[in-house]
Amino acid sequence: MSTENNLISRNKLSVTIKSNEDLYNILSKAYYLPNSNCRCITKNYLMEYLSKDIKIFFMKKEKVIHHHFRKVNKTCQELLELLENLLISKSKFPTGILPDQPPNKEWLLNAILHVDGDDPHKLLAPCGSEELDYKIEVNSE
């Protein structure tokens, strides 16, 4: 992100930002971020978005497609590892998120598909059909 494209100047931030929550709210207008209550949302993580040249993986909010996913039996830590490996294979910056502080599952799944839209890990729900986790039995009475 170049200086002239920077949506938020550091001087303006120093005046308006009083907490991480304020910074998160400002950044989330331009970037697709993990949920604000995730442990990965730290001051250091948020400050990475203010760099002249962002050195972590980021997604512009308007470029993200929110998908419908099948049931994924992986933990957030496993999905974060999958995303980090995918970023390495695509020669992109790492997420900047510590393995013991993973973001929410929806952010991770959308990020994986943002990086590789071909869905090699079969995360997307099949089109035109829904997977049901329940069975309905009708009483004959």
Image: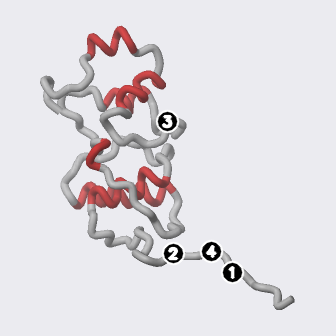
If you read the primary sequence from the N terminus, does the residue marked by circle 4 or circle 3 appear first? Answer: 3
Q: CA distance from mark 1 to mark 3?
A: 36 Å
If you read the primary sequence from the N terminus, does the residue marked by circle 2 or circle 1 appear first? Answer: 2
Amino acid bearing label 4: Asp
x and y, in percent, of residue 69 in the image: 45, 65
User: Considering depth in this image, is 124 or 3 the residue closer to the camera?
Assistant: 124
Q: Which residue is mark 2?
A: 130
* CB within 8 Å, label 1 to label 3: no
Q: Is residue 126 above or below residue 63?
A: below
Q: Residue furthest front?
A: 141
* Mark 2 crowdedness (10 Å alpha carbons): few <14, some 14-19, many ≥20: few
User: Considering depth in this image, is 27 or 80 the residue closer to the camera?
Assistant: 27
Task: Indicate which disc residue 133 carries.
Answer: 4
Q: CA distance from mark 1 to mark 4?
A: 7 Å
Amino acid bearing label 1: Lys
Q: CA distance from mark 4 to mark 2?
A: 10 Å
Q: Which residue is mark 3?
A: 36
User: Please, what secondary structure does the residue beneath circle 3 have?
Assistant: loop
Q: Is residue 92 above or below residue 35?
A: below
Looking at the image, which residue is at 42% across and 29% down?
24
Looking at the image, which residue is at 33% across and 15% down?
13
Query: Which numbered disc, 4 or 3, marks the residue closer to the eye?
Result: 4
x and y, in percent, of residue 110 in the image: 38, 55
Looking at the image, which residue is at 29% across and 56% down?
114
Q: Is 84 displayed left or right of 35 in the figure?
A: left
Quarter of the image with the C terminus is: bottom right
Amino acid bearing label 3: Ser
Q: Is residue 60 above or below residue 88?
A: above
* Mark 3 crowdedness (10 Å alpha carbons): few <14, some 14-19, many ≥20: some
Looking at the image, which residue is at 25% across and 56% down?
88
